[in-house]
Image (cartoon, rainbow, N blue to C red):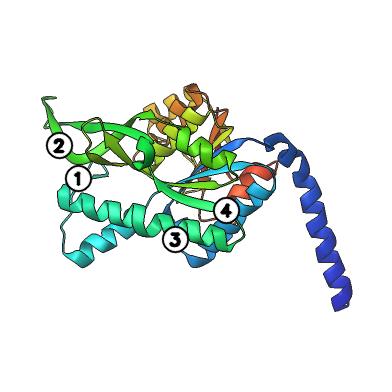
Amino acid sequence: MSKKEGAVENWLSNADMLTAALPYMQKYNGSIVVIKYGGNAMAENELVESFCNDIVFLKQSGLKPVIVHGGGPQIGSMLERLGIKTKFESGMRITDENTLEVVEMVLAGKINKDIASKINSAGGKAVGVSGKDSSMIIAEKLTKQKNLDESNIEKIIDLGFVGIPKKINNEIIETLIADDFIPIIAPLGVGDDGKTYNINADTAAGAIASSLNSKRLLILTDVKGVMDSDQNLIKEADEEKIAKMIDTGEVSGGMIPKINTCLDSVKDGVDAAVIVDGRVKHAVLLELFTDHGAGTLIR
């Protein structure tokens, strides 16, 4: 096969992929899709570039993407550089005043603006904001209980300035969407007392997706999705199936809060939520625009 013939074959293959995606583009046209972005997908340059291009492609295809990002590894690196010790409890960072300053600086300052800038460089129109802007995310303090021993005596764990969404004010998000911008949201909230709270990005994304009645919530993570006991990917699951898997221990650890976020969002108005492998190039496009998807769909 000559170079010219090979090029023609590649063009035809690309054209076939585009026409195969057309029904899905029509399905999602005009729909809001909330995407939680974090993990390795945000740490590797090639995946970052791919993600930003994919977001611009979604926008050009008629979708209305809303990005909520994390930044745990970047926050950890900055705390280490500044010599600020940090502790974790039940997988959550205990956030004192010094830690909170760094969290806000890294999330709302560096990461948020970097993502917006890279999407803009890819041809999009992105605006970076935090959940504090226009009181978008009203938060309340999160408390955790921990069993001290087998006696089941519980102790309240003070996580500091860690919060959960109490209310989402959509006005700023809807204004940005209506003006054809892509909102990039740092998961910070403000309490009724005016205090700033650090919010888990999955939780923030779920609350925002529910508030917007989005068509899809995509949680990008560092695993393929929900796996069964034989480590096979489960393509689709509902609340009953998930409950059984948690009872049997097939689903455990950090996957449980991600799944609960998905279930809560679906109960609160999101059509479906998907746990997607963010380490896969073009994972967002594969999930939305192909038959086989790229993760676990939760209805």
The answer to which of 117 and 78 lies nearer the viewer is 117
Tag shown at residue 158: 2
> Could you classify mark 3 by the number of other residues whose Cα lies within 10 Å: few (under 14), some (14-19), or many (20 or more)?
few
Mark 1 or 4: in front is 4
Q: The C terminus appears in which quarter of the rendering?
A: top right
Q: CA distance from mark 3 to mark 1?
A: 26 Å
Mark 3 or 4: in front is 4
Tag shown at residue 125: 4
- Helix, strand or loop status at disc 1: loop
Please say if 268 is above or below 230: above
Q: CA distance from mark 4 to mark 2?
A: 40 Å
Q: Which residue is mark 3?
A: 114
Name the amino acid, label 3. Asp
Q: Name the outermost residue toward the bottom.
A: 2
Whichever of labels 4 and 2 marks the residue nearer the N terminus, that label is 4
Q: CA distance from mark 3 to mark 4?
A: 13 Å
| Count of numbered badges drawn on the protein | 4
Dot 2 and dot 1 residues touching (CB under 8 Å): yes
Image quadrant assignment for residue 272: top right
Name the amino acid, label 2. Asp
Whichever of labels 1 and 4 marks the residue nearer the N terminus, that label is 1
